[in-house]
Image: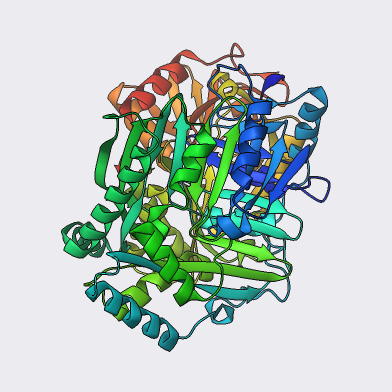
């Protein structure tokens, strides 16, 4: 086993995953804590049609066990799915000897030199263009919600709901999870559909797995069982409310969830059930509820959850532990055995992968798994999306029915107009903002909202929603991206508000300085962030193709008002210079000017020529996602001493110590 750390400036695991093609078979994508794992071309597969799958997994895991003691969650091993109906349907797993791992700051490749080169070749492939929809022509999702067909009618659901209520009154069980499916035709690319879905709806337990003509696309919010160094943890979810359209409404729904005795009772019952399940495989006295009724923010719903942990008995193999607890109590009800029997009678057909589990078994010993909810099963040219919820004695029919629709909202509302996020699209129309997200919070949100309004005024376009609604959409989207910096792009057209989220990667080498080049480019409306911006994009790509870090845009008069994606500052004789016309007034630019004022650095405004920049003592660029970046050469001409200048360094330190203004709920 060889482990290599690679330098991939600007790396995005979803971009990489979308570049996999027919050469990369049986691919898998798994989120484990802060790590994203991508792998393909397994060495062998394990397919067992009944509960003997567990014994097959145990034997394979023992055969593959490694002595590795590092911090990587996956160094090779098995990834696959256990069907909810595991006793009759078993599961499918692939054994992988190589993988690419990413934690937001570094890319690690587990594999020999040939695999490392394969990773580099895939990364160098042309990116998937959002203008070519992942859904494909004729997809059942293309025109949105209306082409998703429910497997049951409202009357069918009501009939089952009333039967459950009778059972509850008779004391047959305390809670039962009732589900159904939505179905749609599909002729597109499954991997790209998964990437589109995950970008629009970030999920903490996202995963993808394929085997033959079947693929599992999961945006699950729920971790099932994690076993690491003898500690076993499970995190059941119960309790749901929609996210609000305004800040006040969102807080109202969150408080409703917290004060709901019904939702509290549901979570209490499942917490007790899972505590009992963990107790069967844990050392006496080690089981505890570490968190109870914690909140989880998702793009369309609030959830509450518990965290239960114990110390695994030395005599119990991790696979035996998950077998003992399977399936997860949050998708059955309690008592589990009675609830599962009644579910089989009411739902009338096997759940299959839905409500089962995606499981990763690392050769290093870690077992990690998710509950397959908010999950699409793609088979042939059909998509199946399972949805449901827990029913207790004080549940009401319409509330439960609406809750299932709310849970499906992220899938059925997926916009196929991805061309708005394609920077090369000359026909895009609208305004946009690009923001930095840290720990689930948007940096300088109010300043971005103010500039969005200004851009709309410059374009003479009415925004499709109120600023409060737009602000809440941004906050909701950002809240799901905790643990790693992200880049959030907001696009507003006359009819829509769309958000695209990607991990933010900053090449640490660029902090020491980049090279830039002059590129002729004339912006139509430079005072706003306005679509299309294909000219700026083309200039930036031209610079990158020639080995430069950024393009400095030269207008028709020979002046250089800004860079393709940044504002320009330069220093002459201790005076800080920047442009104040024919350019977009950046938010970071404004903060640098504040820092200069605080440091008593004199500032002068003018439109520079090429010569002004080439002969400057110092040059640096600013933008919202990356802050300040020194420019140490332009078209092979060294700026100053070819390193970060004294005044630039002072401003960088002042800017970094000032922090960001963040927005959250």
Task: Give the residue drawn at x 72%, y 63%.
Answer: 132
- Badge count: 0
- Viewer-proximal residue among 276 and 80: 276
- Viewer-proximal residue among 348 and 636: 348
307 left or right, relative to 577:
left
63 left or right, relative to 654:
right
Q: Note whether 578 is above or below 445 in the view shown.
A: above
| Visible residue check, residue 624 | no
| Visible residue check, residue 23 | yes
Task: Give the residue drawn at x 51%, y 57%.
Answer: 200
- Viewer-proximal residue among 96 and 55: 55
The colour scheme applied to this rendered structure is rainbow
412 left or right, relative to 172:
right
- Residue 26, position in %: x, y? 74, 48
- Viewer-proximal residue among 491 and 593: 491
Q: Residue furthest bottom?
A: 155
433 left or right, relative to 8:
left
The N terminus sits in image quarter: top right
- Residue 65, position in %: x, y? 63, 24
- Residue 276, position in %: x, y? 31, 44
- Residue 307, position in %: x, y? 32, 41
Q: Residue furthest top?
A: 641
Figure quadrant of residue 647:
top left
Q: Note whether 601 is above or below 189 in the view shown.
A: above
Task: Give the residue drawn at x 53%, y 16%.
Answer: 644
């Amino acid at each position: 086993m060889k482990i290599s750390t690679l330098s991939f400036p600007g790396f995005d695991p979803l971009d990489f995953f979308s570049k996999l093609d027919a050469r990369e078979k049986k691919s898998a994508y798994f989120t484990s804590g802060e790590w994203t794992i991508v792998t393909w071309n397994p060495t062998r597969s394990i397919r067992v049609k009944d509960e003997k799958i567990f014994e097959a997994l145990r034997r394979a895991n023992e055969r593959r066990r490694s002595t590795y003691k590092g911090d990587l969650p996956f160094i090779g091993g098995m990834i696959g799915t256990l069907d909810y109906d595991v006793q009759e349907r078993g599961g499918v797993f692939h054994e992988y000897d190589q993988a690419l791992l990413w934690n937001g700051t570094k890319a690690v490749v587990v594999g020999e030199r040939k695999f490392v080169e394969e990773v580099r070749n895939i990364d160098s492939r042309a990116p998937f263009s959002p203008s070519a929809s992942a859904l494909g022509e004729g997809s059942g999702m293309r025109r949105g919600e209306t082409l998703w067909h429910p497997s049951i009618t409202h009357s069918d659901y009501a009939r089952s709901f009333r039967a459950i209520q009778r059972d509850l009154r008779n004391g047959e069980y305390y809670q039962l999870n009732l589900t159904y499916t939505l179905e749609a035709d599909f002729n597109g690319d499954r991997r790209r559909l998964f990437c589109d879905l995950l970008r629009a709806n970030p999920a903490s337990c996202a995963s993808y797995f394929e085997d033959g003509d079947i693929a599992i696309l999961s945006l699950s919010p729920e971790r099932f069982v994690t076993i690491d160094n003898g500690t076993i943890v499970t995190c059941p979810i119960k309790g749901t409310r929609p996210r609000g359209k305004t800040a006040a409404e969102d807080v109202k729904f969150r408080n409703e969830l917290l004060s709901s005795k019904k939702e509290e009772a549901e979570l209490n019952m499942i917490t007790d059930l899972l505590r009992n399940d963990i107790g069967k495989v844990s050392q006496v006295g080690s089981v505890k509820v570490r968190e109870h009724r914690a909140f989880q923010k998702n793009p369309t719903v609030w959830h509450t959850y518990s965290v239960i942990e114990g110390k695994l008995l030395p005599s119990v193999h991790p696979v035996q532990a998950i077998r003992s607890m399977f399936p997860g109590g949050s998708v059955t009800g309690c008592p589990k055995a009675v609830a599962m029997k009644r579910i089989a009678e009411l739902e009338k057909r096997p759940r299959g992968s839905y409500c089962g589990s995606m499981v990763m078994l690392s050769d290093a010993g870690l077992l990690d798994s998710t509950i397959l909810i908010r999950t699409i099963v793609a088979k042939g040219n059909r998509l199946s999306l399972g949805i449901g919820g827990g029913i207790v004695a004080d549940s009401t029919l319409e509330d439960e029915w609406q809750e299932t629709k709310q849970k499906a909202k992220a899938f059925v509302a997926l916009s196929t107009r991805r061309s708005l996020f394609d920077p090369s699209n000359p026909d895009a129309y609208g305004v946009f903002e690009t923001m930095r997200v840290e720990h689930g919070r948007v940096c300088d949100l109010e300043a971005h909202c103010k500039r969005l309004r200004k851009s709309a005024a410059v374009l003479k376009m009415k925004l499709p929603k109120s600023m409060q609604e737009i602000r809440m959409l941004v906050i909701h989207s950002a809240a799901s991206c905790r643990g790693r910096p992200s880049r959030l792009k907001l696009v507003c057209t006359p009819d829509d508000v769309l958000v695209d989220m990607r991990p933010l990667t900053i090449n640490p080498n660029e902090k020491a300085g980049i090279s830039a080049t002059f590129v002729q480019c004339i912006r139509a409306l430079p005072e706003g962030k306005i679509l299309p911006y294909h000219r700026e994009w083309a200039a930036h790509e031209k610079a990158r193709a020639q080995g430069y870090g950024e393009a400095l845009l030269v207008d028709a008069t020979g002046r250089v008002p800004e860079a393709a994606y940044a504002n320009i500052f330069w220093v002459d004789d201790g005076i800080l210079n920047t442009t104040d016309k024919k350019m977009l007034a950046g938010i970071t630019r404004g903060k640098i000017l504040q820092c200069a004022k605080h440091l008593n650095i004199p500032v002068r405004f003018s439109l520079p020529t090429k010569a002004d920049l080439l002969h400057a003592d110092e040059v640096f660029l600013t933008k919202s996602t990356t802050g300040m970046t020194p420019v140490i050469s332009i078209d092979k001409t060294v700026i100053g001493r070819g390193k970060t200048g004294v005044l630039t360094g002072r401003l960088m330190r002042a800017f970094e110590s000032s922090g960001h203004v963040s927005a959250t709920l």
